[in-house]
């Protein structure tokens, strides 16, 4: 079965509205829903939920209830439904009667498992424009009942490709999820204040700091706070990238923010000599003229060049990169055909008037 990964990833933001729509459909139907307990949950009948929950206890209260909204299918514990209703009284009642705050539900798309969902994951969202502001009181209620703040949850996709089976799983913690998908400051601060593991890795070997320093997730506040609170690491992820490499890759996108983050990294004692991946860095990523100038000035250039056996200016090093790619000399036309922004071409442009050719040697 073919599954579009983008659909699944975008689903993170759609969970509240999809579950809401499904529940509303069921509450508007006239037929019973298989049990008094499930019916009471869907009808938002707090007293009936209390009455039946006291009789169920244990295993039964944690059974997954099934809801359909094609192509989606939900298998959710009662606790998730109560949270969806934003009903703290109902949540408290279920917890008092044995509801497991770590009970993992499942959501499928066209019959294939695609997303696993816990009660705490539903609470740890901040989408005020859609009527879902983060409720720290509800989150603390789950944590006091034993919810694991470092539980790894995410997406699992099973797909058939060319006769073989492909299985992709994201082992994100709630902190990884917040950094990569949500970018919520209130949820981020809550997780750090309540003991989230700053060095726990997901399936690709990325710590929260690795993720916060990547181009698609970069956030200066997240980077600074993670480093300040003890999340600094010099380890490479499974792709061979360190936090420093990630930050340098983002440099042309956000010069001021990255220089600030690099300064925090420097002050925290990041040891360049231990960063082997720095030697593999392709300086074509420093593609904006202003980012090159920022690196060439002051402490930052000295720090970054500290490990080089022969000190070269960043401009000279960039020239060597281009020279290696296209040869010692070339025409301006050939240089213009490179996958480099015009700012870098202008910066490297040095005309040799003796033969009207460009020279990088």
Image (cartoon, grey):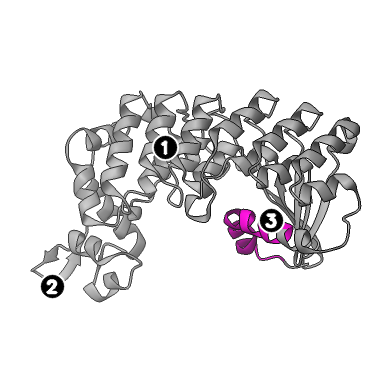
Q: CA distance from mark 2 to mark 1?
A: 49 Å
Asked if residue 209 can be seen in this view, the reply is: no
Quarter of the image with the N terminus in it: bottom right
Query: Which of pointers 3 and 2 indicates the residue nearer the eye?
Result: 3
Label 2: few (<14), some or many (≥20) within 10 Å? few
Residue 223, image quadrant: top left
Calculate the distance from the C-alpha at mark 3 to the C-alpha at mark 1: 30 Å
Q: Is residue 120 magenta?
A: no
* Residue 311 x/y as whole percent: 24, 37
Q: Position of residue 154 (x, y in %)?
A: 67, 46
Task: Identify the disc placed on residue 345.
Answer: none
The range drawn in magenta is 3-23
Q: Quadrant of residue 96?
A: top right
- Contact, CB < 8 Å: mark 2 with mark 1? no
Q: Give the answer, above or below, for where 11 lies relative to 169.
A: below
Is 313 located above or below residue 332 in the figure?
A: above
What residue is drawn where x is 53% and y is 41%? 134
Q: Residue at x 23, y 43 (%)?
A: 295
Task: For marks 3 and 1, give the one nearer the viewer.
Answer: 3
Check disc 3 and report the residue beneath it: 19
Where does label 1 land, which residue?
222
Mark 2 = which residue? 356
- The one of 313 and 3 positioned closer to us in this rendering: 3
Q: Earlier in the sequence, mark 2 or mark 1?
A: 1
Q: Residues within 10 Å of mark 3 (few under 14, many from 20)?
A: some
Q: Secondary structure at mark 1?
A: helix
In the picture, residue 197 is in which quadrant?
A: top right
Asked whether, in this view, residue 28 is left or right of residue 346, the answer is right
| Residue drawn at x 19%, y 67% as measured from the top left | 358
């Amino acid at each position: 079965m073919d599954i579009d990964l983008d659909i699944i990833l975008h689903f993170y933001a759609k969970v509240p509205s999809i579950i809401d729509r499904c529940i509303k459909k069921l509450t508007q139907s006239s037929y019973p829903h298989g049990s008094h307990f499930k019916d009471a949950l869907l009808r938002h009948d707090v007293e009936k939920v209390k009455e039946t929950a006291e009789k169920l206890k244990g295993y039964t209260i944690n059974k997954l209830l099934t809801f359909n909204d094609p192509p989606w299918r939900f298998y959710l514990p009662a606790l998730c439904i109560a949270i969806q209703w934003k009903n703290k009284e109902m949540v408290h009642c279920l917890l008092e009667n044995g509801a497991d705050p770590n009970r993992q539900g499942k959501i499928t798309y066209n019959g294939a498992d695609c997303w696993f969902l816990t009660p705490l994951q539903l609470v740890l969202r901040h989408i005020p424009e859609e009527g879902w502001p983060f409720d720290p009181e509800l989150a603390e209620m789950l944590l006091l009942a034993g919810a694991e703040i470092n539980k790894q949850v995410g997406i699992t996709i099973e797909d058939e490709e060319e006769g073989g089976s492909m299985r992709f799983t994201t082992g994100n913690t709630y902190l990884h999820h917040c950094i990569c998908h949500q970018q919520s400051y209130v949820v981020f601060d809550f997780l750090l204040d309540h003991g989230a593991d700053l060095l726990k890795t997901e399936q690709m070997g990325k710590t929260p700091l690795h993720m916060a320093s990547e181009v698609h997730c970069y956030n200066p506040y997240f980077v600074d706070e993670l480093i300040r609170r003890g999340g600094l690491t010099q380890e490479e992820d499974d792709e061979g990238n360190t936090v420093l490499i990630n930050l340098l890759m983002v440099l042309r996108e956000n010069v001021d923010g990255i220089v600030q983050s690099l300064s925090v990294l420097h002050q925290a004692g990041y040891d360049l000599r231990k960063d082997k991946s720095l030697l593999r860095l392709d300086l074509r990523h420093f593609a904006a003229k202003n980012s090159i100038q920022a690196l060439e000035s002051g402490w930052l250039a000295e720090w970054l060049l500290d490990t080089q056996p022969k000190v070269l200016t960043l401009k000279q090093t960039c020239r060597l990169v281009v020279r290696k790619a296209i040869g010692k000399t070339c025409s301006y036309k050939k240089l213009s055909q490179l996958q480099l922004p015009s700012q870098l071409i202008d910066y490297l442009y040095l005309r040799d008037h003796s033969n009207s050719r460009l020279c990088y040697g």
